[in-house]
Amino acid sequence: MKKLILTTAALALTAGMAMADTVRMGTEGAYPPYNFINDKGEVDGFERELGDELCKRAGLTCEWVKNDWDSIIPNLVSGNYDTIIAGMSITDERDEVIDFTQNYIPPTASSYVAASDGADLSGIVAAQTATIQAGYIAESGATLVEFATPEETIAAVRNGEADAVFADRDYLVPIVEESGGELMFVGDDVPLGGGVGMGLRESDGELRGKFDAAITSMKEDGTLNAMIKKWFGEDAAVYE
């Protein structure tokens, strides 16, 4: 799950939402299995299924809006959609600008992937721009190379531009499994973030309350755990 680093005070703008039955759900559409665009050109993945179920339980109608990751918070704040549901980890820094529901995925690890088990993790490491993973690498002493999309970070390792990539383990697992041994996990996992939640404008407390109640109901009846295992595998972290 990606962790956006906020870099501008301009995000402190507010845009109130008039509560309505239709809620615009903002997502990236480029971070499987959290969210992606399927062959029909539609938003798909864990968060599409989850978001539709949350809206159903909250008595709301969902409309899905695709937005690039690096501007996903500014466009929420400015009113281009009403929620962010895009693999976004809850962090104190983000919480200063937007509000969050409770998490719908518990905290999970970030990991390194490389083309050999002898990769230099203090060398050149790729990460998606404007993420906490990028911030972590920048402070680690390694040389950070940033890319706009997660696919480009993987390509940087494959073409030798980077020694390793650092990203959410959940995102990396299927890539490693499908690489046929070309890519592998290296080094230790690193815990980052406070789980994944929905982002909302700070003025939309009523809407947050509706989604919090829906998330709670899915935790209590086991639906959320089943959905997590469906999309992330039987070994995925779930709620007790």
Image (cartoon, rainbow, N blue to C red):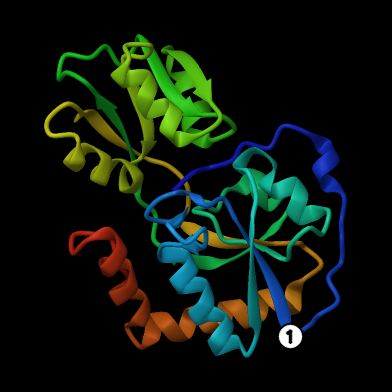
Residue 125 image point, x, y percent: 39, 18
Horizontally, residue 14 falls left or right of residue 63, namely right
Q: Exactly how many numbered labels are in the figure?
A: 1
Q: 228 or 46, which is in the foreground? A: 46
- In the image, residue 147 sits, relative to residue 53, either above or below, namely above
- In the image, residue 66 sits, relative to residue 227, either above or below, namely above
Horizontally, residue 186 falls left or right of residue 25, namely left
Residue 234 image point, x, y percent: 18, 64
Query: Residue at coordinates 79% horizontally, 82% vertically from top-left?
Result: 20
Q: Residues within 10 Å of mark 1 (few under 14, many from 20)?
A: few
Q: 221 or 127, which is in the foreground? A: 127
Q: What is the residue that sits farthest to the left in this orientation?
A: 181
Residue 41 image point, x, y percent: 51, 58
Answer whether residue 136 is visible to the viewer in this image. no
Quadrant of image for the C terminus: bottom left
* SS label for mark 1: loop
Answer whether residue 76 is visible to the viewer in this image. yes
Query: Which quadrant of the structure image shows residue 107?
Result: bottom left
- In the image, residue 75 sits, relative to residue 214, either above or below, namely above
Residue 28 image point, x, y percent: 56, 50
Query: Residue at coordinates 51% horizontally, 34% vertically from top-left?
Result: 149
Query: Which quadrant of the structure image shows residue 11?
Result: top right
Horizontally, residue 172 falls left or right of residue 47, namely left
Q: Which residue is mark 1?
A: 21
Query: Residue at coordinates 70% horizontally, 74% vertically from top-left?
Result: 23
> Which amino acid, by three-letter code, is at mark 1?
Asp
Query: Residue at coordinates 22% horizontally, 14% vertically from top-left?
Result: 119
Q: What is the residue that sits farthest to the front in this orientation?
A: 40
